[in-house]
Amino acid sequence: MNRSAFITRLRSLTGAVASPRLEPARLAVTASALTAGGAAWLAGDAGLADLLWGLGTLAAVPPAVGWVVAALRHGRTGVDLIAVLALGGTLAVHEYLAGVLIALMLATGRTLEAAAQRRASHDLRALLEHAPRSARRRTAAGVAMVPLAEVAVGDLLVVGPGEVVPVDGRVESAVADLDESVLTGESLNVERAAGDTVRSGVVNAGGAFELRATATEQDSTYASIVRLARQAGAESAPVVRLADRYAAWFLPLTLAVAGLAWLLSGSAVRAVAVLVVATPCPLLLAAPVAIVSGISRASRQGVVMRDGGALENLGRARTLLLDKTGTLTRGRPHVLDVLTAPGWQPTEVLRLAASLDQYSPHVLAEAIVDTARERKLVLSVPFDVTEEPGWGASGIVDGHQVSVGRFDATDARPSWARAVDNRALLDGAAVAWLTVDGSPAGAVLLRDPLRHDAPRTLRHLRAAGIERLLMLTGDRAEPALEVGAVLGLDDVRAGLDPAGKVAVVRAERDRAVTVMVGDGVNDAPALAAADIGVAMGARGSTASSEAADIVLTADRVDRLADAVSIAVRARRIAVQSAVGGMAMSLAAMAAAAFGLLPPAPGALLQEAIDVAVILNALRALRVDQTARPALTPTAEALIHRFASEHHDLQDVLEAVHGAADHLSDSPGPQALAAVEEAYRLLTERLLPHEYAEEHQLYPALAPTLGGPEAMATMSRAHTEIERLSRRIATHLRLAHAEGGLSPGQLDDLRGCLYGLHTVLRLHFTQEEESYFSLAE
């Protein structure tokens, strides 16, 4: 057998004997040998006891040697070398009981470590499964399905509804309605007109369109995402065990003390005794137990960690990068506001739009329908519904010709429609216009809102030790900067493609241990490139989950703050246990060097040290009292109730704002009627809600949040809401007494309505972020 073959054979052999899959069997063998030998010793058969203990010790030697060889192959000399020397020493000086105790300790430590470190492969099955394998190519003979590898630059392709765009290209049809969330993470569909470029990997959300290929399969965007993720994953080095870092000085010190004890005393037994008490159980056991405990604790919070290295790194992280859509925001559009033409009410505009959109698969249509149902609007059954990709749906609702979608007015837009355009620009919102019998009746503004738990989460992350918070997004700069300002982020990087995100992650890794959080396929390369990748697994893509080290199984970003707090605490406990255990081991080593501690009692003492450090490490299982406050069942039920009512009260806020708009447009009888309707909604629905919050929810939350003083600011908002409502009532009494609104009332009444709308929006947002985000 030549040298190369011998080395290969040796590696295979050491890998087999040191396989983590055999750890439970080794633990069972060692425990059985110790127990059987103890029974023989109690029965008076010391020879049989030594035989059994010796066999148990001998069984631990091959895997221990395998661990040492494996460490040496990777350029590390870890604490396992001490264990090998101790095992060999006990066999040499016939201290078999000490040997089997060491073997049991090693088997226990390795079993725990195997449970702590199960790194999943960063294969990209989901990325590859999403990638198309074929394309529809149009030729003079018609449309034929061809393998993707055969598509050449210049080919004319047909992309059907719901299909993935196979290669980068240029739109040849009039318009293409595309879901680009797989690349940008943005949930809103985009329209690409003729001549616009389209990247591979996006989904056709409209009708079939023609695409002129501008790149081959290998040169297209989606293939580059797969390559980026593979390269980034390959660059993520495995985490060195916490124990090995301490072993850098503990190992040479142990060998020096054992050597001096043998040299000065001439007794090999003393040297073996030093090795026995130095066998690094505090290192082999304390760190894995604390890490496993931390992983177990995190799993109860809906945080799945791939291995102990992920938790250890998370505990050292100082920089956090977050994707926007689906991570800091909800990942799906939500109705922001309903604006109307003169003579129309917001609820009626929303009801008509939702009635028609019941038959539309568009993401904006789904949001409109969901909002109408949340507000308990009665939807009509539409007839003759048709939908034109890129323009919207049209049909008959309640006997009227209704359309929802784009609005392309040939004449100059009325002032209220221009106001809608301006509002959409300021709020970064999409607009769904409603026309009834050919005339515009209103518009629904939609936006992807912030998660309620995002602000609280970022505050807790900073408190847990995260020093730098950045947001990475493929979205436009304006909405991204607004989100960054609201959340107080340190930096915002907008308009990034997957390669841009990876570049930012790599730059941040050069400064500090870095965490990347995302939920889409487009985030997978950045997750793999970071020191720790965290995937929003509840609604995120499979690819992002498989490229991550940590997966949040609950659709709550505040679980990330819990994970960081747990990781910091578990790592601190692991270090405490390891350092404390080594200190006790050093004292025992000194006693053994002077002949005061023979090998067998030394092994028993070492086991006592093991128990102490394990009990300390198990503290990582306990709930940290500084974690998210625990709610009583009553408080949690009230939170769910009032959160649901917030959804139902959105039409009241719109009515208040709409009444103020009517006063600005035309302060006549219609405006007065709008104010009266808004006040009716206030008195019948909103004020009772606020009263119930003040007298039911806040008292239930006060003990959890530190007493009534913690609720004082929010209670003050209730007072202001009631004050403004009374002021509006006074204006209405004056108007009724004088037969209409007087010019002197207009400014103050308009200010009351706009002010009340602003206070209510801010108050709702504060409650949702501070209180409602506490509930599951």
Image (cartoon, rainbow, N blue to C red):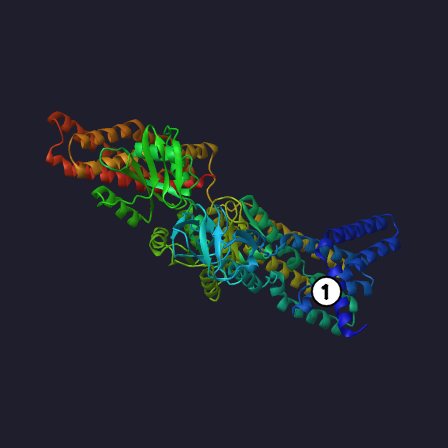
Q: Residues within 10 Å of mark 1 (few under 14, many from 20)?
A: many
Residue 622 at x, y percent in the picture: 56, 46
Count of marks overlaid on the render = 1
Q: Residue at x 15, y 26 (%)?
A: 736
Residue 536 in the image: state x and y as whole percent. Answer: 50, 49
- Along the line of sight, which residue is nearer the eye, 151 or 505? 151
Residue 114 in view of the camera = yes
**Residue placed most toward the observer, 590 or 641:** 641
Q: Looking at the rendering, in which quadrant would you find the N terminus?
A: bottom right
Q: Is residue 251 left or right of residue 392?
A: right
Residue 718 seen from this side: no
Residue 496: x percent and y percent?
42, 59
Horizontally, is 292 left or right of 216 in the view?
right
231, above or below 663, in the image:
below
- Residue at x 71%, y 63% (from the top left corner): 67
* Residue 442 picture location, percent across and down: 28, 38
Q: Quadrant of residue 26?
A: bottom right
Vertical comparison of 539 with 116: above or below: above
Disc 1 element: helix
Q: Quadrant of residue 696?
A: top left
Residue placed furthest toward the front: 141
In front of the other: 504 or 64: 504
Amino acid at circle 1: Leu
**Quick one: 395 or 303, which is closer to the camera?**
395
Q: Can you identify the residue that label 1 sits on?
A: 275
